[in-house]
Amino acid sequence: MPAPARSSLRRRLFGWLMLPLLVMLPLLGAALYRQVQHSAQGWLDEGLEDTALTLAGQIDLRGGEPRIDISATMDRALRFDRQDDVFYLVLSPAGTVLQGDAGLVELQPRPHPQVAGSAYYGDVWLRGRELRLVQLGRECGQGACQVLVAETLHKRDALQREIATYVAVNGIALALLLGVAVWWATRQGLAPLTGLSAELERRDLHRLTPLRASLPRELVPLQAAFNRLFDRLGRAAEAQREFLADAAHQLRTPLTSLQTEIELALLEPHDQRLDPLLQRLRQRVVRSARLAQQLLSLARAEDRSVDVGQRIDLRDVAMESGQDWAHRTLPHDVDLGFELAEAPALGHAFLLRELLENLIHNAVNYAGPGARITVRCGNDEEGSWLEVEDNGPGIPPAERPAAMQRFRRGDQSMRTAGSGLGLAIAADIAARHGGRLDLLDAHGGPGLRARLTLPPVSEG
């Protein structure tokens, strides 16, 4: 069953921060639109009222009767507008048309306002056209003259569309800017957590030192909890290493004694029919002793107290190992050779000899009789290297990662005796030194080439 998709904390924070913004922005945009539209409407209404006040100022009384004289030039000035049609009408207190467009009478002017400066505003329809109207009252003797000024709504509609466009564009731009700002703030706010995750990713049983990062207050308890966990893991790993080392050490002595006794039994007069049994016993004891030695090497490789920062030369390590193998009995027709060059490195000589011992032992054990095994070392731009090459059956590329895991053996290796620890121990020692162990094809033919690469040594 596939695992459920995991939500991202960053996306969750971003979503919860953006949700109220996305809800509020349209409401704020609508409120801003109404406010700006109301202000613009007021400015345009004031323009109409100014025209009405101008007309009202032209009314005078002659013989007690209101009169108004508007010249053609003034009439054009009052009606001038680049976008709208302007209409006006001046009525006497009795409702008689004094000046202007008589058609505005159809609007049924209100009886109020009664005094100059008091105005009425409204939207009206006249002959299928919507108009904006201002009606202003002015004292005219025994009553109030009414001044009406109206105009079409072209510039008002255009202004509303322009305001709506500006508000929408700026709202969208603001939403995008806020989205970027919230995403950046979320990323920065989670940066300490990301750094803590990266630091935890680099931790393993070989590196359980406490976390020392400077973190926000909210993450300090989490860091403390991890440090307590690392402490418990470190104590458990140390107890496991001590048990492994003690057990391996305790097994070596009786196994060595048993091996000696079996070899003496083979030398003493005995029934020759027992030779196959004694040889099998001897092989089993040798294998058990080898396993104990490997377990001890594994414990040493994981010991954090071992200083792997000593200046050494891999050539010296290989030479010492070669001298050791010179005194051993190799299988029939096995050719073990050395091609050594200067290879300065930082490490622990004993652990690196254990690594080389396991590589050579694997090559001798699995390459078989007639094998040709070559130990090389040198130095290049990647650092110092040490490799063991054989012309045996090798390991298929698909099986090589598993071959470096503990107690895992390839199909080819199943034909020979072994515990499946040799390459795993070599890989652990390589990692302990900050290097890597690669399983490669042999040069120019079948076989396997196990190559250790260590970091370059700085001068000084």
Image: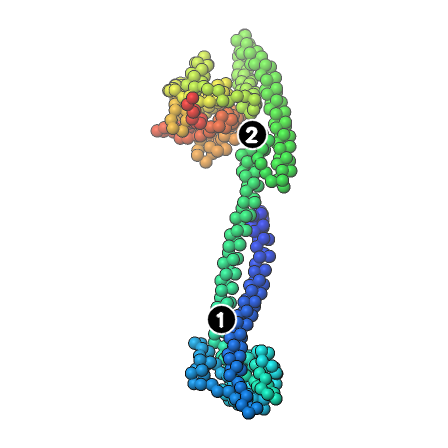
Q: How is the image coloured?
A: rainbow
Identify the residue position indicated by label 2 in the image: 207
Identify the residue position indicated by label 1 in the image: 159
Quadrant housing the C terminus: top left
**Which residue shows up at 59% across the image and 17% down it?**
249
- Residue 153 is situated, as x and y percent measured from the top left of the image, at 50, 77
How many neighbours does mark 2 have within 10 angstroms: few (below 14), some (14-19), or many (20 or more)? few
**Which residue shows up at 58% across the image and 12% down it?**
257
- Residue 435 is situated, as x and y percent measured from the top left of the image, at 47, 28
Q: Is residue 25 above or below residue 364?
A: below
Farthest top residue?
269
- Residue 277 falls in which quadrant of the image? top right
Residue at mark 1 to residue at mark 2: CA–CA distance: 70 Å
How many neighbours does mark 1 have within 10 angstroms: few (below 14), some (14-19), or many (20 or more)? some
- Residue 213 falls in which quadrant of the image? top right
Q: Nearer the viewer, residue 105 or 416?
A: 105
Q: Which mark is first along the chain, 2 or 1?
A: 1
